[in-house]
Amino acid sequence: MSTWYILRHAEKAKGDYYNPLLRHQDEPLSQKGRLDAERLGAYFCAKPTITAIYISGYQRTRQTIEYVTERLRLDPIVDERLNEIDNGLIGGLSDQEIQEKYPDVWKAYRERCADFRFPGGESGAEAQQRITSFLEEKRRQHGNEDILLVSHDGWIRLLMCTILGLPVYHRWNFQVDFCGLVELSPIGEGNSWKLIRFNQACLFNPLPAI
């Protein structure tokens, strides 16, 4: 039985790091995030069965896992299907600004009883389509192999809705901390999954000496 390790990136820095290719902020890790990323090395180096590492197109996912990729000698594979849910034009706006500029979006966000599309971005269902595409493809590709994914808060929350068969707007009911780990195992040949752990803090081991 294979194991999928799904990790949220470490803490990101504050500031303006707009990336025109992504059309969003592309913050690097903060100083604390970099320290936490180093500590991740100890945890995942104890899992030598990992055969592939996938990251999103954001630099903070690559930075989070760089110590692990060095020690496991695996090149991270960028897959934009792991990118954060596209919140379009509300990115960087305060709650007050969202209420004033996009009252319908704010109302849908607060009520959380139906899916909606971020202005200039994605709906939950649209983001879920790329998540499902990724899951189906990698299940076929990796079979019984263990793999590691590094993604984002909203993506992981929506992943939970996908594997548990919940409506996409229930994603707001989950919390994923920086460096929070989800562990899954595919069941059989269909689309079933076993949830082993959720939002585990995996920073309890010191970085091994080199």
Image (spheres, rainbow, N blue to C red):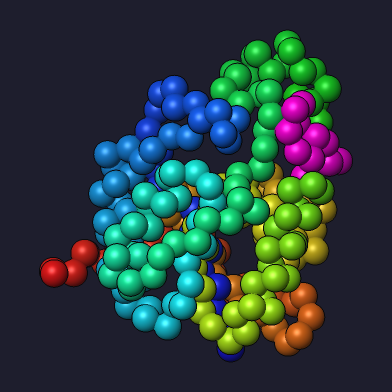
Left/right placement of residue 147 relative to residue 209 reads: right
- For the C terminus, the quadrant is bottom left
The correct choice, above or below, for 53 with respect to 161 in the image is below
Q: Is residue 111 magenta?
A: yes
The correct choice, above or below, for 194 with respect to 165 in the image is below
Q: Pick the residue in front: 75 or 131.
A: 75
Q: Residue at x 57, y 23 (%)?
A: 92
Q: Position of residue 125 (x, y in %)?
A: 81, 48
Q: Residue at x 18, y 69 (%)?
A: 208
Q: Position of residue 162 (x, y in %)?
A: 75, 61
Left/right placement of residue 169 relative to residue 197 reads: right
Please state the extent of the stretch shown in magenta in the rendering. 109-124
Which quarter of the picture shows residue 186? Answer: bottom right
Q: Pick the residue in front: 38 or 172.
A: 38
Report the predominant secondary structure element of the magenta stretch. Answer: loop
- For the N terminus, the quadrant is bottom right
Q: Position of residue 170 (x, y in %)?
A: 75, 49
The correct choice, above or below, for 67 with respect to 147 in the image is above
